[in-house]
């Protein structure tokens, strides 16, 4: 393993941790969206939709997974 590969491993691990947080936030956001709809609070529904857009942007900005990340 080269020095460059070793230095990238902690970075890849951080990216994977970010993906896990994004996934958790997505699950919590889905719950919030359902509650907002059930309570019929339009402002919260709009806020949840805005948060969903921000979450998508975060996902798009994460570096793509490498073969090593998936192992």
Image: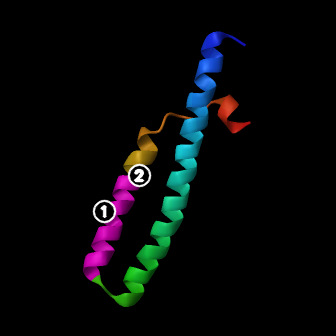
Q: Who's the residue at 35% across and 61% down the image?
A: 51
Tell me where residue 2 appears, x and y as whole percent: 68, 10
Tell me where residue 11 appears, x and y as whole percent: 56, 29
Q: Nearer the viewer, residue 50 or 10?
A: 10
Q: Quadrant of residue 14?
A: top right
Label 1 Cα crowd, 10 Å radius (few <14 / some 14-19 / many 20+): few
Residue beneath label 2, please?
56
Residue range in magenta is 42-55
**CA gap, disc 2 and disc 1:** 10 Å
Label 2 Cα crowd, 10 Å radius (few <14 / some 14-19 / many 20+): few
Question: What secondary structure is marked by label 2?
Answer: helix
Q: Is residue 24 above or below residue 66?
A: below
Indicate the colouring scheme: rainbow
Tell me where residue 33 appears, x and y as whole percent: 42, 75
Q: Quadrant of the N terminus?
A: top right
Q: Who's the residue at 69% across and 38% down the image?
A: 70
25 to the left or right of 55: right
| Label disc, if present, on residue 50 of the rendered structure | 1
Q: Is residue 62 above or below residue 56?
A: above
- Furthest residue to the bottom? 39
Tell me where residue 54 appears, x and y as whole percent: 35, 54
The majority secondary structure of the magenta stretch comes to helix
- Furthest residue to the left? 43
């Amino acid at each position: 393993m080269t020095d460059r590969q070793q230095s990238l491993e902690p970075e890849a691990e951080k990216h994977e941790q970010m993906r896990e947080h994004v996934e958790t936030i997505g699950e919590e956001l889905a719950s919030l969206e359902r509650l907002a709809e059930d309570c019929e609070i339009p402002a919260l529904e709009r806020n949840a939709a805005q948060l969903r857009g921000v979450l998508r942007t975060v996902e798009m900005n994460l570096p793509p997974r490498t073969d090593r990340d998936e192992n």
